[in-house]
Amino acid sequence: MPAIDDLDAQIARLFLAEPKIGVLEASRRLGVARATVQTRLDRLAERGVIASWSPTVSPAALGYPVTAFLTLEVVQGEGRAPVADHLASIPEVLEACTITGAGDLWCRVVARSNTDLQRVLDAVVSEPSIVRVATVIALQTELAPRVAPLLDAALGLDTAAPPAP
């Protein structure tokens, strides 16, 4: 069974594009009853398809314009929980994922400056289970985090193809 049907994808796509649209306006634009939109939104949220109604906050606007990606190597056999708990205690660590390949964990971090990044790195490596960190600094965001193409795919839209003449 597909995760979402066409109407679910249309509703999610509309709220993704215009988060403040409101259920009534969404129902008007989609040509369905307000209760249908509300029911579908509730169901999408219950199933975890819509993960959050939170605003997207810009770290740069909060004074953290430097983004870096860290690949951490951790002591084997001690589990990820102590490292994950440690990373969660550092406000500048925005995301951490277990990975395959040369490292064990990947983190996205922010800092107030390149100099401040050293402070963040020092905080990260203060956990004894972290044995090595490789850092790359992002110069420019070429493609921000996105999910709209997945919704387009669910709708059967080929976003990679040029528009028909």
Image (spheres, rainbow, N blue to C red):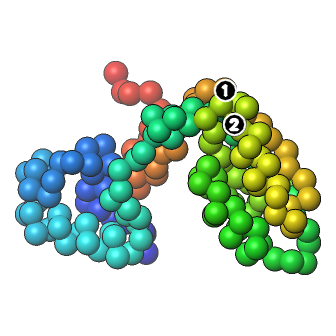
Between 73 and 23, the one nearer to me in the picture = 73
Tell me if mark 2 has few (under 14), some (14-19) or many (20+) residues whose alpha carbon lies within 10 angstroms of its own. Answer: some
2 or 1: tag closer to the N-terminus: 2
* Count of residue discs: 2
Find the distance from the CA under tag 2 to the CA under tag 1: 16 Å
Which disc, if any, is residue 47?
none
Residue at the spot of label 1: 139
Residue 37 rendering spot, x and y as whole percentages: 17, 64
- Res. 148 visible in picture: no
Q: Secondary structure at mark 2?
A: helix
Q: Quadrant of the C terminus?
A: top left
What residue appears at the point 43 percent right and 75 percent down from the top-left corner? 1
Whether tag 2 and tag 1 are in contact, CB under 8 A, the answer is no
Q: Is residue 10 left or right of residue 96?
A: left
Residue 91 rendering spot, x and y as whole percentages: 59, 54
Q: Is residue 65 left or right of residue 131?
A: left
Residue 51 rendering spot, x and y as whole percentages: 41, 64
Check disc 2 and give the amino acid type.
Asp
Which disc, if any, is residue 116?
2
Q: Is residue 25 left or right of residue 93?
A: left
* Depicted 21 relative to depicted 113: above or below: below
What residue appears at the point 82 percent right and 58 percent down from the top-left corner? 126
Tell me if mark 1 has few (under 14), some (14-19) or many (20+) residues whose alpha carbon lies within 10 angstroms of its own. Answer: few
What residue appears at the point 66 percent right and 26 percent down from the top-left corner? 139
Q: Is residue 7 left or right of residue 126?
A: left
Q: Secondary structure at mark 1?
A: loop
Check disc 1 and give the amino acid type.
Leu
Viewer-nearest of discs 2 and 1:
2
